[in-house]
């Protein structure tokens, strides 16, 4: 998928995230990375990203490039404050067109389920999902998965990791195929 289409997909993702978020919720680059990962790899809505595991969990350089491109054309703005860099919608830009099969309604449906999680929960859920899907151990029990996550993220309390895995399991069990 070309970078302009990926940027169009990410612009749709940002629009969906900002439209379903409650007052006080916001989109940062870290949250956007986790939303994108879970949308694409847990809910199977293709965005054109190839994530790798990093310090903050799954990270797609294509998403970082897309947000930079969107900023360059004023389709989004970033405002720095104590919470990080908040992403806000900018001007409409006809240069960015999402994949024809990307459904804004499907994105909103999935994001309604994700926006209530805090950034740390999103990081842990995305990391656990990435580890589990890239592991040779099948099936991976929650205790083993928690050990793997804690190895990468020792600064997180084990109970928080297990709670995030529990939330991930609920999402996995209840996901509906999207149109």
Image (tube, rainbow, N blue to C red):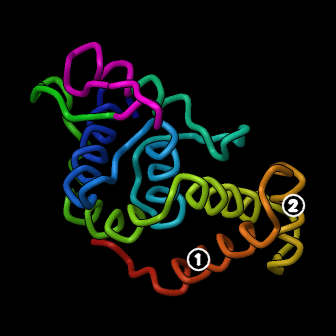
For the record, the magenta segment spans 67-86
Residue at 29% over, 60% down? 107
Question: Would you place residue 105 above or below residue 61 in this image?
Answer: below
State which quadrant residue 142 falls in: bottom right
Query: Which residue occupies the foreground of this view, 49 or 36?
Result: 36
Residue found at x 33% / y 19%:
69
Tell me if label 1 and label 2 are in contact, CB under 8 Å. no
The image position of residue 95, as x and y in percent, is: 16, 23
Q: Name the residue under label 2.
A: 148
Residue 123, visible in the rendered structure:
yes
| Picture quarter with the N terminus | top left
Q: Is residue 139 above or below residue 127?
A: below
Disc sitting over residue 151 in the figure: none
Q: Is residue 71 magenta?
A: yes
Residue 170 placement (x, y as % from top left): 55, 83
Where in the figure is residue 124, as x and y percent of width and height? 66, 59
- From the image, tell me which residue sits under label 1: 167
Pick the front one: 80 or 136:
80
- Mark 1 residue element: helix
Residue 45 percent coordinates (x, y): 39, 59
């Amino acid at each position: 998928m070309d970078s302009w289409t990926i940027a169009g997909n990410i612009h749709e993702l940002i629009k969906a995230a900002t439209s379903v978020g409650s007052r006080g919720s916001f989109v940062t680059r870290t949250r956007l990375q986790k939303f994108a990962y879970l949308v694409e790899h847990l809910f199977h809505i293709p965005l054109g990203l190839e994530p790798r595991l990093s310090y903050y969990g799954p990270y797609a350089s294509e998403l970082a490039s897309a947000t930079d491109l969107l900023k360059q054309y004023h389709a989004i703005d970033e405002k720095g404050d104590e919470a990080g860099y908040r992403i806000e919608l900018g001007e409409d830009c006809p240069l960015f067109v999402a994949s024809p099969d990307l459904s804004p309604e499907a994105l909103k449906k999935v994001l309604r389920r994700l926006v209530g999680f805090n950034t740390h929960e999103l990081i842990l859920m995305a990391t656990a999902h990435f580890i589990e899907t890239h592991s040779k151990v099948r099936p991976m029990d929650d205790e083993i998965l928690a050990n793997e996550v804690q190895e990468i993220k020792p600064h997180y309390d084990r109970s928080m990791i297990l709670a995030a895995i529990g939330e991930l399991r609920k999402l996995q069990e209840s996901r509906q195929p999207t149109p």
